[in-house]
Image (spheres, rainbow, N blue to C red):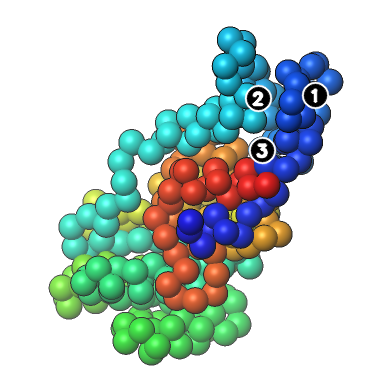
Amino acid sequence: MTAMSRLGAGLGARLRAALGADRAPDEAAWAEAEEVLVAADLGPRLAAEVVVEARKRTAGGDVSAHTAISAELGERLRRVRDHPFEVGPPPAVILVVGVNGSGKTTTAAKLAARFQKEGRSVLLAAADTYRPGAVEQLRLWGDRLGIGVVAQRAGADPAAVAFDAVAAGVARGIDVVIVDTAGRLQTARDLMAELAKVRRVITRQRPDQPRHVLLVLDASTGQNGLSQAETFLAAAGVTGIVLAKMDGTAKGGVALAVVDQFGIPIAFTAFGEEVGDLAPFDPAAYLDWLLAA
């Protein structure tokens, strides 16, 4: 059992209570199950679709309602899991984006530690120049991991930091350059424009980069996660999700809603504060966590 699955989200118990253990669910039970899925942040559309398809799976009487729901959720996750996360040839640039408080800087450090453990050289870029202490926080992570950090003064142009980091990555023969961006609110148009500028600057230097744009999504963020994903997708071309803060209070269903609506795969899950608390996304473990009793 993984650390993630041990935490548990409790959705399974609520579904079992709605559907009953020893009887075929009636209309009222299915309706209640749909409400439970909505409350778990899957959203009304996805919850309704899952229930419709789950009912089809139980039509023969050989599959329980709970199993049918789990199977339907798993199928939707598998639709965007065609290929595992691959770093790509050096220097691979990874842009880390997300709103304030999602855990971006810590996630950037966790990614760096993971790639370092795989034997790759890593360079961090402190392009979150707006938040007080963000640059210093990344520098502390860099010192702890023995990884170089490209940074400028607070308030500096984030695109300039990204430019310098990519140039340094090329000059030093670095395998992976991880750019930590500002924790901007998705409704702040000027800041989203700044993020788009950071991406353009990287692409002008290296037309095939950034290799990945990872959206750090707080597992407890609720349906607001859908608007975050939509806006960051438009501004930065998100290629994958890091589902962070997978603790016992998180509902976590919004990640499934994002995957289903936008076709963005979950690349990693982060479930603690230690640098090693990051793992490649495992659909089965995620469903175990989401549907835990």
Total numbered labels placed on residues in the image? 3
Q: Which residue is mark 2?
A: 65
Q: Nearer the viewer, residue 273 or 241?
A: 273
In the rendered image, the vertical position of residue 240 relative to residue 17, given as above or below: below
Q: Residue furthest top?
A: 60
Secondary element at tag 2: helix
Q: Which residue is mark 3?
A: 42
Residue 169 visible in the current orientation: no
Q: Which residue is mark 1?
A: 29
Q: What's the residue type where badge 1 is placed?
A: Ala
x, y percent for residue 45: 68, 27
Q: Nearer the viewer, mark 3 or mark 2?
A: 2
Q: What's the residue type where badge 2 is placed?
A: Ala
Q: Give how far apart the Cα atoms at labels 3 and 1 are.
A: 18 Å
Q: Could you tell me which residue is drawn at 62 percent across and 43 percent down?
A: 291
Secondary element at tag 1: helix
The reply to whether dot 3 and dot 2 touch (C-beta < 8 Å) is: no
Q: Give how far apart the Cα atoms at labels 1 and 2 are.
A: 10 Å
Q: Give how far apart the Cα atoms at labels 3 and 2 are.
A: 18 Å
Q: Residue furthest right?
A: 28
x, y percent for residue 115: 30, 68
x, y percent for residue 15: 73, 36
